[in-house]
Image (tube, rainbow, N blue to C red):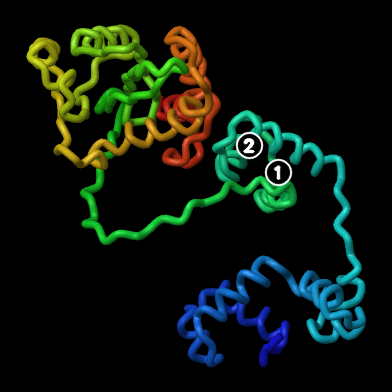
Amino acid sequence: MKKSRFTDSQIAEALKRVEAGLAVPELCREMGISSATFYKWRANYGGMDTSMMARRVVTEQEVSVRLACQIFTVSETCYRYEAKKNAEDERIANWLLRLTDNHRNWGFGLCYLYLPNVKGFKWPHKRVYRNYKDLELNLRIKPRKRLNREKPEPLAVPEEINEAWSMDVMHDPLSDGRSFRLFNVIDDYNRDALGIEVDFSLPSERVIRALKQIIEWRGKPNIIRCDNGPENISAAIQTWASETGITFHYIQPGKPQQNAYVERFNRTVRYEWLSQYYWGDLDEVRDFATRWIWHYNHDRPNMALGGLRPKQRLAIAA
């Protein structure tokens, strides 16, 4: 095996410099290495501190502990130190395991925001993250191919409740193969889930009925943003909108990003519960959707709201 002309301590220092902000191409030019070599170093040594690297050298290269500590300039006390878990760490670990078991698509961010914002725990960020890493709960991030796209126009941010709603329709199959639809409505101001209507068919009359039921307890919106689906552009819904004084804003065909608030909500619905189970009938879906809406509005931190829950944001605004 070819021996590297750089020592482990030099490799560790190079990785630290990149973490501190030095560009990878600049470091490669300075050290006379290829970018492939650097990324190989990071794959082998990334996330390791000097004491961990010293232990690796002792194990793999069979050098003495004293020599390894001299190479990496760490004390033997630091080398031999083993962190001791206490009862509070056990409590944090139990909460993290409970959250990730009940919400399999929650990453560290949502788990951490849930603990202080919903449960009131005052644990430091680093302490929670250390336990999260020790439990190896990290979600796998799928690599994405980057495409050059035009920068979309930012969506208007509502300044008050009922200023703008967004609505959209989703599809999913039952266990017997029959496809059903979900009609989702949210308030753009605080991302409040206002309703999820479930049925095999959702014509414009059902859409109007669902909107009327929401307006009875929520109040009337000024604007409703939606796509150009047949249920949204029918004569019946146009007449109803004219009578109620609600303006419908239709996005351009093939531009779902123009309705990004509800599209992001759809993704949460899809990955948190809709695609997680086999559904036997519509009543099962409706019951789960009703219970999940309460959880989403009252218990689930929302990253777009700075970690606040939709009802919490509404209470602050009031």
Seen at 51% across and 39% down, the residue is: 307
Q: Position of residue 300 (x, y in %)?
A: 53, 30
Residue nearest the observer in this picture, 100 or 201: 201
How many marks the image carries: the answer is: 2
> Compared with residue 264, is residue 239 higher up or lower down, i.e. above or below?
above
Seen at 86% across and 48% down, the residue is: 85
Seen at 66% across and 32% down, the residue is: 101
The C terminus lies in quadrant: top left
The residues tagged by marks 2 and 1 sit, at their Cα atoms, a distance apart of 8 Å
Q: Position of residue 261 (x, y in %)?
A: 32, 35
Residue nearest the observer in this picture, 190 or 182: 182
Q: Position of residue 153 (x, y in %)?
A: 21, 49
| Of pointers 2 and 1, the one earlier in the residue sequence | 2
Residue 162, quarter of the rendered image:
top left
Residue nearest the observer in this picture, 134 or 116: 134
* For residue 47, side relative to residue 285 (left or right): right
* For residue 222, side relative to residue 3 (left or right): left
Residue 257, quarter of the rendered image:
top left
Q: Secondary structure at mark 2?
A: helix
Q: Secondary structure at mark 1?
A: loop
Identity of the amino acid at label 1?
Trp
Q: Position of residue 114 (x, y in %)?
A: 60, 35
Circle number at residue 123: 1
Residue 191, quarter of the rendered image:
top left
> Compared with residue 132, is residue 240 higher up or lower down, i.e. above or below?
above
**Badge 2: few (under 14), some or many (20 or more) residues near its Cα, within 10 Å?**
some
Q: Residue under circle 2?
A: 116
The N terminus lies in quadrant: bottom right
Q: Are marks 2 and 1 in contact (CB under 8 Å)?
A: yes
**Badge 1: few (under 14), some or many (20 or more) residues near its Cα, within 10 Å?**
some
Farthest residue, direction front: 176
Identity of the amino acid at label 2?
Pro
